[in-house]
Amino acid sequence: MNAIERSNQAQLRRLSKGEETRAQILDVALNVASESGFEALTIGSLAERTGLSKSGLFAHFGSKEDLQIAVLDEGARRVTDMVFGKAMASPRGVIRLRALFGNWLTWADTCQLKGGCPIMAAAFEFDDRPGPVRDAVLGHHQRMQREIARSVSICVDTGEFRGDTDSRQFAFEILGIANAFYFSHRLFREADASERAFAAFERLVKNALATSPQSGDSNPAH
Amino acid sequence: MNAIERSNQAQLRRLSKGEETRAQILDVALNVASESGFEALTIGSLAERTGLSKSGLFAHFGSKEDLQIAVLDEGARRVTDMVFGKAMASPRGVIRLRALFGNWLTWADTCQLKGGCPIMAAAFEFDDRPGPVRDAVLGHHQRMQREIARSVSICVDTGEFRGDTDSRQFAFEILGIANAFYFSHRLFREADASERAFAAFERLVKNALATSPQSGDSNPAH
DNA sequence: GACAAACACGAACGATCGTGCTAAATTGTT
DNA sequence: AACAATTTAGCACGATCGTTCGTGTTTGTC
């Protein structure tokens, strides 16, 4: 959801003035966090971008820390919508898992976040800085990993995956592929990043399929 | 190499005073970058930690940007030593590749960098900020990916891996596993992070082995 | 339209940021 | 020991950081 849609929604749902301003701030802030990281989320620059005064903006969040957490939560909310929510339209099992994976790779672009997934960046920024922000990052990522593992378990339930599939290991490896995609896509700017990611994903899936894959093409080449 | 060893080396090689001070600064700076990221590399805090004055420290690097790049290069130098250099002691082929992978997971701990690999963190910090620092990060990572792909190619040469193995895809997936390890180890603080990483790695290897693996245990569970 | 509540602004604060100067102290060489 | 070169300290600068406070303006309710 972009700022304009939110503005429309505000008129419909009678969102209070303060709540709407706050939402607009978060929209801008999420873009900044996406492009330049959470460290770059300064009150001054945010005020300038939103047209508010420093103190006016500051009043919506009691502290910079609370602002960071609010941005984090907003990012997580969008991930939930754009990745997990959207995948629910697909039928249970491997098809939904594949949709989930695909959505994860593209959700930042879909949301017009020019700098990639902020939640991903936050993990590296705060993994060694104890405090409420790190706790929030940890919580969101743990929830996401749990959700992915659950989607893998469903593939076992449907009989598509073998019964001895380790769903948490599967989620671990999916997280890895998504990260490799980010390196390839955002740092290296390689055009075939998404193909490489899907190739890795399909290899992962093939290894778990109940119909044993003994043919010769089970190699890491696409 | 820690500060003390460097100090000894300075006495042996007649490292000039300025060069030694610079090396000590970089040692401290690398720790800061490891724990708190490159954004936290401020002249003031570094001066305090090293006992130098702000201007005295600043004089060793012409600008903050040059300092960041110097820290980056020092980090890359250590990676080259601790990961690639060390793996050269192992025989060519899969054994060396495995050593390479293992070294990559543990090198930050081995170097007593309490906050994980700084080069990894830098990738996420600068992937969307064009400039000399990003260029340096990009260069180091591209070099590392090339080295890994080359090690995979050697496994083809030794006849251990099939001829149609895509070495760059292999390197892509290794990068992913290393990233997943970082999430699991540094953010989630999971005790079995390294087991999960090695399980994923061995699955990757098994798929590329020339001796076709059609048995039923080629599953993502360890 | 009145009135209370919510919201935004402007000014100022101490601290710290990166970065210039100049002078003093230290180092290396003869 | 003298001297030049290198290295470090001291001080100051404009800018920006997060935050507080008092005042004005806008909003929602009766």
Image: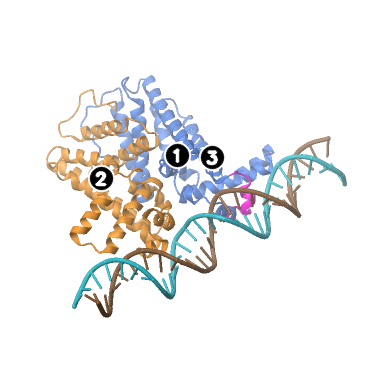
Chain colours: A blue, B orange, C cyan, D brown
Q: Is residue A103 found inside the magenta-colored segment of the image?
A: no
The numbered disc on residue B92 is none
Q: Give the residue number, with chain letter if any, for mark 1.
A: A130
Q: Is residue A95 above or below residue A50?
A: above
Badge 1 or badge 3: first in the primary sequence: 3
Mark pair 1, 3: CA separation: 21 Å
Location of residue B213 by image quarter: top left
Do the residues at discs 3 and 2 belong to one chain? no
Q: Which amino acid does label 1 sit on?
A: Pro
- Say few, some or many: other residues with alpha carbon within 10 Å of mark 1 (under 14 / 14 to 19 / 20 or more): few
Please give the name of the residue rendered at 33% of the width and 35% of the height, measured from the top-left corner: A201
Q: What residue type is labelled 2?
A: Arg
Q: Nearer the viewer, residue D21 or B181?
A: D21
Secondary structure beneath dot 3 equals helix
Q: Give the residue number, with chain letter if any, for mark 3.
A: A74
Magenta residues span: A48-62
Q: What residue type is labelled 3?
A: Glu
Q: Where is residue A11 in the image (x, y as percent from the top left)?
A: 68, 41
Closest to the camera, between mark 2 and mark 1, is: 1
The numbered disc on residue B168 is 2
Q: Which chain carries label 1?
A: A
Please give the name of the residue rendered at 61% of the width and 53% of the height, measured from the top-left corner: A54
Q: Where is residue A1 in the image (x, y as percent from the top left)?
A: 56, 42
Q: Which chain carries label 2?
A: B
Q: Which of B142 and A201 is in front in this view?
A: B142
Q: Is residue B41 left or right of residue B156?
A: right
